[in-house]
Amino acid sequence: MNLKRYGLAGLVILVLFWAGWSLSGRSHSFTSEVLELEQVYNISGDANCERNVVGIQPFMKTEDYLSEEKFQAKMSGYFEEARKAGFLRKKTIVLLPEYLGTWLVINGEKESVAGYADMQSAMGVMILSNPINFFRYYLDHGDESDKVAASLFRMKSGAMAEIYGRVFRNLASSFNVTIVAGSIVLPGPAVQQNEIVISSKQPLYNASFVFYPDGSIDPHIVLKSYPIGSELPFLESAPIDSLPLFHLQGTSTAILVCADSWYPDSYKMVDSLDAALVLVPSYCTGDGTMAKKWKGYDGGAIPADVDRLDVGKINEGEAWVRYALPGRIARCKAKTGVNVFLRGQLWDLGSDGQPFFVRQGQLLDVPGSEKAGIWNLCF
């Protein structure tokens, strides 16, 4: 009997210890966010143009995602700098990069999750500190090959959608602009009664949303059609013919999420929609990736119009110019396009990429930034 009593007591102590560890470090003190803004540049030189796109390349750190307050402050900082520069006007569209909202997956987690050098360790701590919730999703939802990543996103998707929607509604109304808010990974996303809602049993998508100056969210959602190799184990692809058309500040607009901008079928859809403007939110992982030799198409079949001899010959940056937005938009009816990239220090993922601005079918020469940057294009 004594052994049983001691065993039970030990189990209680272990559970209490785990509970204390799990709950500790979740209260995140707010500190003023450092923007690390290296470039604020007016491409057009026209201070009074009627329509403009402001591309923002934020430099995000893992700790920026630990709380809604931190994320809101970081985003507000970039918008305030754009306003100070005179870029935010009556008919402004702000374009933000891919995956910007995705790392809200660590919102409310232990502060140590943001401090790990590699993402696998961070995911491990998330699982250990939320075991019951995590395994509920792991056992009951989805058939993705990467069930760990999928379960973590499903587990946090409700809070992620709420924060993402609330922050960008506030920014759109506060700064009186239209926002293409990069992208976020969510299961079965939809917009109902001006709220982003999810269905945890539905497939996960890389989704982009549009927010308007009146605080509303466009009911149409852009879902990535060509996930890359690192996304395929947990993300579903959407048919490219589901691509919606937006009328942003009087301009017919198509949004292609990152790799979608590499495929001819995407531009056939752009033409069928009669879009005049193409916006591309992107995220290129790996520090220094753009200078490395191009490995070819990642996740999807190489299109027939691609010179296969370029694989391993040109670098990644040259491939983006030749086969993504800058090279392909010249062959469709839309003649204006903007592509921005997410930069930052996010575990061991790395980041690379510089913005592309195309006007009248021509790629413009603009100064880049290795950290944060804001660029304004009149069109």
Image (cartoon, rainbow, N blue to C red):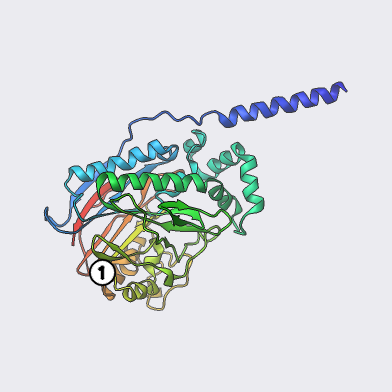
Q: Nearer the viewer, residue 253 or 280?
A: 253
Q: Which residue is mark 1?
A: 276
Camera sees residue 161: yes
Residue 146 appears left or right of 266: right
Q: Residue at x 80, y 22 (%)?
A: 6
Q: Residue at x 48, y 56 (%)?
A: 189
Point out residue 245 in the picture as x, y percentages from the top left corner.
Answer: 34, 67
Give above or below for 322 relative to 343.
Answer: below
Camera sees residue 370: no
Q: Where the C terminus falls, by quadrant? A: bottom left
Q: Quadrant of residue 295?
A: bottom left
Amino acid tagged 1:
Ala
Q: Where the N terminus falls, by quadrant? A: top right
Q: Residue at x 60, y 53 (%)?
A: 147
Q: Nearer the viewer, residue 35 or 77?
A: 77
Point out residue 239 in the picture as x, y percentages from the top left corner.
Answer: 47, 70
